[in-house]
């Protein structure tokens, strides 16, 4: 099964850290995620562009731009995952239109795939960064 990139989980990890410790440096984030600081900087850039974080140059670090209960997992997903034309699932581009399956597969699958995407987005929209942080505190 194909996976959504790890950018979503890394971005959520970073923002959960920020929900507990303002502000954070790239090195602190990279140490917790255990990845290269370049990956962290790239994701922080996406989060900044989406308006979820503010970054101060130098050792100022990064911080949330709004309270953790105002950020949903869907906000995070939308900030870092590249979804073309708001469509999560892609179809193969050149099915054989002379074949009854090839001619109709996209039309047949599109509704189911749209419903699956809507269900995922609905679930992510109902979980805030604050709720996730609370779960992390319970696990500690």
Image: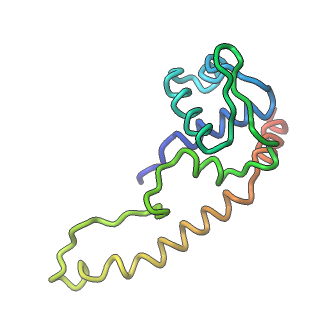
Residue 122 placement: quadrant: bottom right
User: Within the image, what quadrant is residue 118 found in?
Assistant: bottom right
Work out which residue is located at the far top of the displayed protein and give it.
Answer: 59
* In the rendered image, the vertical position of residue 134 relative to residue 97, given as above or below: above
Q: In this view, does 31 lie above or below 88?
A: above
Give coordinates of residue 138: x percent, y percent.
84, 39
Residue at the image point whose x is 38% and y is 63% from the top: 90
Residue 85: x and y in percent read 45, 62
Q: Which residue is drawn at 38% across and 82% down?
A: 108
The residue sitting at the front extreme is: 57
Instruction: Name the image colouring.
Output: rainbow
Horizontal and vertical percent for residue 8? Answer: 57, 43
Residue 74 placement, left or right of 23: left
Q: Toward the viewer: 59 or 137?
A: 59
Q: Which of 55 and 132 is in front in this view?
A: 55
The structure residue drawn at horizontal position 80% and vertical position 48%, both measured from the top left corner, is: 131
Q: Position of residue 42 (x, y in %)?
A: 51, 31
**What residue sits 49% from the left and 62% below the top?**
86
**As displayed, is residue 140 above or below residue 96?**
above
Q: Quadrant of the N terminus?
A: bottom left
Count of picture labels = 0
Question: Can you name the residue that lies furthest to the bottom here?
Answer: 100
Judge from the rendering whether residue 5 lies leftward or rightward of residue 108; answer left or right.
right
Image quarter (top left, top right, bottom left or bottom right) of the C terminus:
top right
Residue 83 left/right relative to 137: left
């Amino acid at each position: 099964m194909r996976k959504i990139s790890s950018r979503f989980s890394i971005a959520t990890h970073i923002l959960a850290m920020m929900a507990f410790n303002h502000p954070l440096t790239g090195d602190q984030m990279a140490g917790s995620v255990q990845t290269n600081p370049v990956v962290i900087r790239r994701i922080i850039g996406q989060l900044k562009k989406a308006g979820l974080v503010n970054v101060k140059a130098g050792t100022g670090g990064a911080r949330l731009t709004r309270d953790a209960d105002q950020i949903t997992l869907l906000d995070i997903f939308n900030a870092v995952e590249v979804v073309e034309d708001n469509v999560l699932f892609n179809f193969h581009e050149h099915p054989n239109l002379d074949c009854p399956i090839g001619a109709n597969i996209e039309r047949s699958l599109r509704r189911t795939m749209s419903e699956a995407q809507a269900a995922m987005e609905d679930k992510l929209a109902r979980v805030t960064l604050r709720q996730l942080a609370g779960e992390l505190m319970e696990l500690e």
